[in-house]
Image (tube, rainbow, N blue to C red):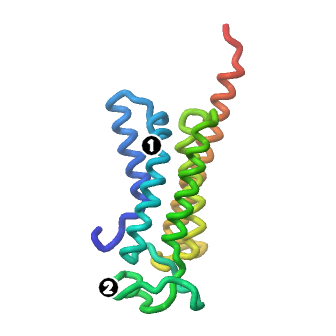
Amino acid sequence: MWNGGISILGAIVGGFAATAIYTRRNQLSFWELTDILAPAVILGQAVGRIACFLNGVAFGAPTGTGFGIVYPEGTMAFDRYGAVPLWPAEIWEGQLDLIVFGVLMALKNIKLPVGGLFLSYTMMYALVRFSLEFLRGDSPRYALEWTAGQWTSAGIFLISATLMVYFFFKRNHQTNAIPM
């Protein structure tokens, strides 16, 4: 654990499970609470990427050019690649997380179904993470040359999109129902 192994995707899944337990025990609406928490979570992720950069973790792959970040000795990035310029993947992810935060704040003014804001967050973050994983230099590759982060992001996106469609259908069905 102290040498890696806990990713933000695992934390999101773990937080999802903990929130489900908490809301069930306290008789709260799970989806309403996650809608409230979603902007704060992505903002926290953006700040967390600053720590990744400062610690030389979650780093990019070699750029193959003079462009990139050269990490100092003593960081995981330097230990792996030395003084080779690497893609600034964690910086770009932090910036994209801030954009997702802004979009979520704008979406708060739109009438989404309950759970829609949280699912928007999970879908947008899954797209960000999936895309940036192509530039990462700290993750092994598996089937289709995807990283574990890409496989997890794809799964999260598909589940979230399915739930979003279900919630929209459910809301529209309830809205269009003829009252008796």
- Measured as percent of width and height from the top left, residue 144 is found at 60, 73
Residue at position x 47%, y 75% in the image: 139
- Residue 64's spot in the image, x, y percent? 58, 90
Q: Which residue is mark 2?
A: 74
Label 2 environment density (alpha carbons within 10 Å; few <14, some 14–19, many ≥20): few
Q: Which residue: 36% across, 75% down? A: 55
Is 32 left, or right, of 173 in this rendering?
Answer: left
Q: Secondary structure at mark 2?
A: loop
Q: Quadrant of residue 117?
A: top right
Q: Is residue 56 above or below residue 6?
A: below
Of residues 13 and 103, the one nearer the viewer is 103
Classify the position of the N terminus by image quarter: bottom left
38 shown above or below 112: below
Q: Is residue 158 shown above or below 141?
A: above
Residue 95, x across and y down, in percent: 54, 64
Quarter of the image for the C terminus: give it.
top right
Which numbered disc, 2 or 1, marks the residue that appears first in the sequence? 1
Q: Secondary structure at mark 1?
A: helix
Which residue was labeled with disc 1? 37
Q: Residue 9: horizontal and vertical position, in percent?
A: 45, 59
Residue at 65% in and 23% down: 174
Residue kind at label 1, given as amino acid type: Leu
